[in-house]
Image: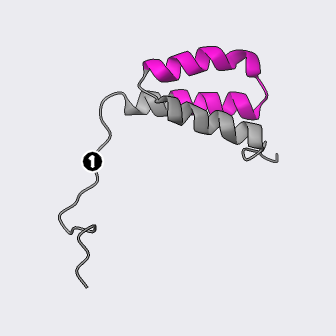
Amino acid sequence: MNNRLVSQNHQPKPPGPGEGRKATALYKLFEALINEEYERCPELIRQAKAYGATQLEVRVLLGGQIRGVHKRPLN
């Protein structure tokens, strides 16, 4: 079978500059949602977008919280 989608020469692209900041901003938003700190969310969303987060990435976090996918971790 000839599978053209998988290539032996394909190497994952390393994260670009700012990817760490974007991930950190999205994680802070995730934490605020888990801890029900909703008053922090608008500013955290602005920060995430400033560091390159897409509307879809923010929606996934917000949508998961609305549907109850993200649950507060047990301590």
Residue drawn 27% across and 69% down? 6
Predominant secondary structure in magenta? helix
Residue drawn 52% across and 35% down? 57
Residue 25, percent across and down?
53, 26
| Colouring style | one colour
Q: Which residues are magenta?
A: 25-50
SS category of the residue bearing label 1 = loop
Instruction: Name the residue type under label 1.
Output: Lys
Between 70 and 24, which is closer to the camera in this rendering? 70
Between 34 and 54, which is closer to the camera in this rendering? 54
Q: Quadrant of residue 7?
A: bottom left
| Relative side of 69 to 56, left or right | right
Residue 10, percent across and down?
22, 60
Residue 44, percent across and down?
59, 19
Residue holding disc 1? 13
Q: Residue furthest bottom?
A: 1
